[in-house]
Amino acid sequence: MNHITKLKSKLSSVKKDFNPMTIPMVQISQTHLEKIYKFDLSSEIDANEVVNIIYKFRETVPYSNKGKTNVFAWHSNFDTHIKTSDFDSLIETIQNKLRLIGPTHDWEEYEVTYPITESWAGIYKKTEYTIPHAHEPVQYAAVYYAKAEEDCSPIVFKTLDKDLEIVPTTNTLLIFSGRAWHYVPRSTSDNERIIFAANFVTSFSQK
């Protein structure tokens, strides 16, 4: 059996009844038939440390792409994971969560990894926002909330019948499909909303 035939056989035999709700600390909502995974990283990541890293990194990148991308707030360039290793621990934690929710069942012959393709840090101040957008062609988008007070703006996903709002909290990680359209309404809070976001693809290699 050649490589392509083996791959097709594996695809056809993937279990259809896998229930991600069995994964600890995962909550799921539906948007355009896509799943949104919500993790609490409070036992794994020091949010204050990430906030300090982002503030420190902003000193090296005082300019912003504000108004040049979908994000109308300060944010670093999309190669932040290349410019600094300070976020490596957080990125590895996100990749570990991707291993929980990705296509790992019944793939004994293949190693599945989740290479990072883009990443950026962001600080939203009062009146700042993000316009509706998606992250295609990547498979997964992730956003980690290093600081998110009770009065912060939600992240809003565009669904077929209505918008789905998720109000984040500090140390929350959201992972969702790169195809999911989403935006952040204009902030009305005096508190900063500080995030680290990244995109990931799925990679298969034969063991």
Image (cartoon, grey):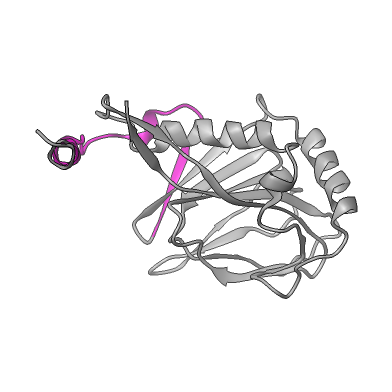
Image quarter where the C terminus lies is top left
The furthest residue to the bottom: 67
Image quarter where the N terminus lies is top left
Residue occupying the point 82% across, 40% down? 53
Q: Quadrant of residue 127?
A: bottom right
8 vs 63: above or below: above
Q: How many marks?
A: 0
Q: Is residue 134 magenta?
A: no
Residue 47, percent from left and from top: 76, 35
The stretch of residues the image draws in magenta is 7-31
Q: Quadrant of residue 74?
A: bottom right
Left or right position of 134 against 73: left
The furthest residue to the left: 1
Left or right position of 94 against 26: right
Q: Nearer the viewer, residue 62 or 129?
A: 62
Residue 125, percent from left and from top: 82, 62
Residue occupying the point 56% across, 62% down? 156
